[in-house]
Amino acid sequence: MTLRQFAGLGALLSLAMPGLALADEAAAPVLNSGDTAWMLTATALVLFMTIPGLALFYGGMVRSKNVLSVMMQCFAITGLISILWMVYGYSLAFDTTGMEQGVVNFNSFVGGLSKAFLSGVTPSSVTGPAALFPEAVFITFQMTFAIITPALIVGAFAERMKFSAMLIFMAIWFTLVYAPIAHMVWSGNGGLMWDWGVLDFAGGTVVHINAGVAGLVACIVLGKRKGYPTTPMAPHNLGYTLIGAAMLWIGWFGFNAGSAAAANGTAGMAMLVTQIATAAAALGWMFAEWLTHGKPSALGIASGVVAGLVAITPAAGTVGPMGALAIGLVAGVICFLCATTLKRKMGYDDSLDAFGVHGIGGIVGAILTGVFAAPALGGFGTVEDIGAQVWIQLKGVGFTVVYTGIVTYVILKVLDAVMGLRVNEEEEAVGLDLAQHNERGYNL
């Protein structure tokens, strides 16, 4: 072939290439490398929230004889839920087989098993609302949400539950509670709460109300720690707790901004409102405590940080800066009151305030999302009738509270009858580090 002939063939191919490219795009979508890079980063940030973030946050708040037990629970849950997510959890949460918008059937409540063992997932399978990234990344991203949710429950029954019972409870709870709630809220058209119009951008209902209510039920079923509330049970290392809170704060940008599922303007705004709401809640809790008790505490500001992060989670994709400021301030003050006054009056032993911060913060955030997502109040959602959207949010909250509360109670009561939930008094006195793991957190 002469040089002239080669050049002519090249010209013909160049003319044909746009059509070939369009046909190829239709057949096999091309990954968006920017969105993929962001989702890989966000996934790592969310895992960072549980290990080491939550492990340190909770570990510092328990007594020194129980520090390893709480950290061990966080690590064990990370391993357990990762495998269950691979085997069937992802499929139960996101399989859309049999779903139809506006039709309530079994698949409105839980997915099928067509994705069990991650069947059909390959390096080339993609996902994403507009821009595309690997399905494998989406699976891992959602896995980190499934990991942290049961880990949050640990804070409610810390220092008194058997490790073996905890593992079995978490496996069953993940299967019967987390996966169905995630499916109902996030799976798309045909999901029960999705069809209702419940707004939950990053997990106020799926993660925080879910975990908070389960924690409240668990601490009531197990009963109070020996000596509570008359025996002092001060946190043994608030340095750990502050470091853990800082890790949660940083990791939460992956949690909220990552839920945009793209590197776009929604992710940017989610990051901004997360920072504003968290700062407002930290200050709200701090000043409420200062006025009530005369001094602000390190534990208080750390708890306020988490309350703000929790409350902005359902709203992060739809509210503006002023809405975030309001949500943060309200959540900081209300969570302070519930974690102190309400707990004392009701008499339950929520060891590390899992319900007071996550349950209450999630409820506050979910309801206020219906208010501040409205464009009339600076939001970016499609809410035109605030009253109607608040009612939808209340339905979502109510359904989650009732469903989670009842199923969690049944699981715990059955396990208690079969194998017992709680360590004996001697083991509790010695501490779970030695009694359950034959180790000490500190050998001084």
Image (spheres, rainbow, N blue to C red):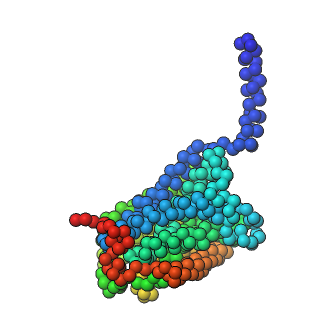
Residue that appears at 52% across and 76% down: 214
Position above or below: 219 against 76: below
Quarter location, residue 315: bottom right
75 displayed left or right of 259: left
Task: Locate the C terminus by quadrant.
Answer: bottom left
56 displayed left or right of 148: left
Q: Give percent across and percent down for residue 66.
A: 34, 72
Q: Give percent across and percent down for residue 230.
A: 32, 86
Q: Which residue appears farthest toward the front when viewing the image?
A: 418
State the residue in front, 172 or 191: 172
State the residue in front, 131 or 425: 425
Quarter location, residue 143: bottom right
Q: Give percent across and percent down for residue 20.
A: 75, 34
Q: Give percent across and percent down for residue 58.
A: 39, 69
Task: Locate the N terminus by quadrant.
Answer: top right
Q: Which residue appears farthest toward the left when viewing the image?
A: 444
| Residue 416 seen by the camera | yes
30 displayed left or right of 203: right
State the residue in front, 310 or 426: 426
Residue that appears at 41% across and 75% down: 158
Quarter location, residue 233: bottom left
Position above or below: 307 against 423: above
Residue that appears at 49% across and 61% down: 79
| Residue 394 seen by the camera | no
Residue that appears at 59% across and 72% down: 177
14 displayed left or right of 420: right
